């Protein structure tokens, strides 16, 4: 862990504009005293603009859940990273739901990562193996292919800014939602950093933030955040309930305070 703990709430296709507004209000009330954490909200595209006017920017940052890699053109129904550049700090790219349901393949994820960086938006690159791939012993190969392809067109300096979210597909509540043991998560995170070291060197790999996602809740988050390899969490289901997300933020904050006392 270097720097602030990063906690990202991926609301997926939940919450309309007024529900989102209420959630932020409640979350703000419940996390007034929680400092020195980086809390990022990823609402639907429709909600980004109104939330940008509502949020306390000292407390929350915004992320897009997706965008299209071309800057503009005849692409009906899409929104580009260029259009989001002044609105969001981050964009989630390569989420397993997008890879599975919308066929975002390796080149598409690579192009989205590049487009995000080109528009000064930090990509949160999601990588992770399916249950089948895990059983077949393919985890490392999958992580290797997803990481190396996605970063292919970036300079070393650009890679340093990227956040990688290790989200084993089998641990995400959308799919099997199994509990991922922190030991196993740590091993995969080390492997991800190892890949980046091979490509860009130790200095770059240490700068990259690696976070965990997959059925994280208030009782499990600390187990992941305590890993020296882990810089934060990407939260799905538990982030659309202000009390549950606040419990996660609280657990992270308490861990940070207790570590500061020990140091
Ligand atoms: P859950 O926390 O619902 O398992 O979702 C994780 C996720 O997909 C975050 O991007």
Image (cartoon, rainbow, N blue to C red):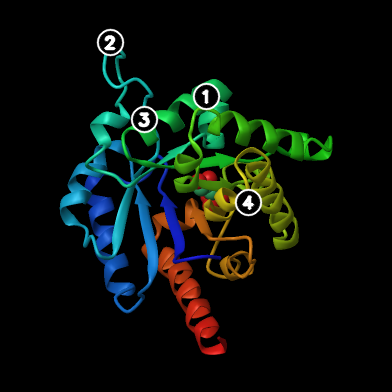
Q: Which residue is mark 1?
A: 104
Q: Is residue 180 visible?
A: no
Tell me the crowding category of disc 4: few under 14, some 14 to 19, or many 20 or more residues within 10 angstroms, Cα based: some
* Left or right of residue 68, residue 105 in this image: right
Tell me the crowding category of disc 3: few under 14, some 14 to 19, or many 20 or more residues within 10 angstroms, Cα based: many
Q: Which residue is mark 2?
A: 74
* Between discs 1 and 4, the one toward the N terminus: 1
Quarter residue 57 falls in: bottom left
Q: CA distance from mark 2 to mark 4?
A: 42 Å
Label 4 secondary element: helix
Kindly identify which numbered label has been placed on residue 202.
4
Query: From what the image shows, is residue 19 above or below residue 86?
Result: below
Query: From what the image shows, is residue 134 above or below residue 35?
Result: above
Q: Which residue is mark 3?
A: 67
* Left or right of residue 111, residue 63 in this image: left
Image quadrant for the C terminus?
bottom right
Disc 4 and disc 3 in contact, CB within 8 angstroms: no
Label 3 secondary element: loop
Q: CA distance from mark 2 to mark 1?
A: 19 Å
Tell me the crowding category of disc 1: few under 14, some 14 to 19, or many 20 or more residues within 10 angstroms, Cα based: some
Taking the spot 65% from the left edge, 45% from the top edge, the residue there is: 197
* Between discs 2 and 3, the one toward the N terminus: 3
């Amino acid at each position: 862990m270097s720097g602030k703990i990063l906690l990202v709430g991926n609301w997926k296709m939940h919450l309309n504009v007024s529900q989102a507004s209420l959630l932020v209000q409640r979350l703000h009330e419940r996390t007034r005293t929680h400092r020195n954490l980086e809390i990022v909200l990823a609402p639907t595209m429709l909600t980004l603009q109104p939330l940008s006017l509502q949020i306390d920017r000292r407390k929350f940052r915004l992320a897009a859940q997706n965008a299209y890699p071309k800057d503009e053109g005849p692409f009906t129904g899409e929104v580009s990273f260029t259009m989001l550049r002044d609105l969001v700090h981050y964009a989630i790219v390569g989420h397993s739901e997008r890879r599975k349901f919308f066929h975002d393949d390796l080149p598409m994820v690579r192009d989205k990562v590049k487009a995000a960086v080109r528009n000064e938006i930090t990509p949160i690159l999601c990588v992770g193996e399916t249950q089948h791939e895990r059983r077949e012993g393919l985890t490392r190969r999958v992580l290797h292919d997803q990481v190396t392809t996605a970063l292919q067109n970036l300079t070393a300096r650009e890679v340093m800014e990227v956040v990688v979210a290790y989200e084993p597909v089998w641990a995400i509540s959308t799919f099997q939602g199994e509990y991922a043991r922190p030991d196993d998560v740590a091993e995969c995170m080390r492997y991800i950093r190892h890949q980046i070291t091979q490509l860009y060197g130790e200095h770059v790999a240490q700068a990259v933030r690696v976070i965990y996602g997959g059925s994280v809740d208030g009782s499990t988050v600390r187990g992941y955040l305590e890993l020296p390899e882990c810089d934060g969490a990407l939260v799905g289901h538990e982030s659309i309930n202000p009390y549950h997300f606040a419990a996660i933020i609280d657990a992270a904050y308490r861990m940070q305070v207790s570590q500061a006392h020990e140091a």
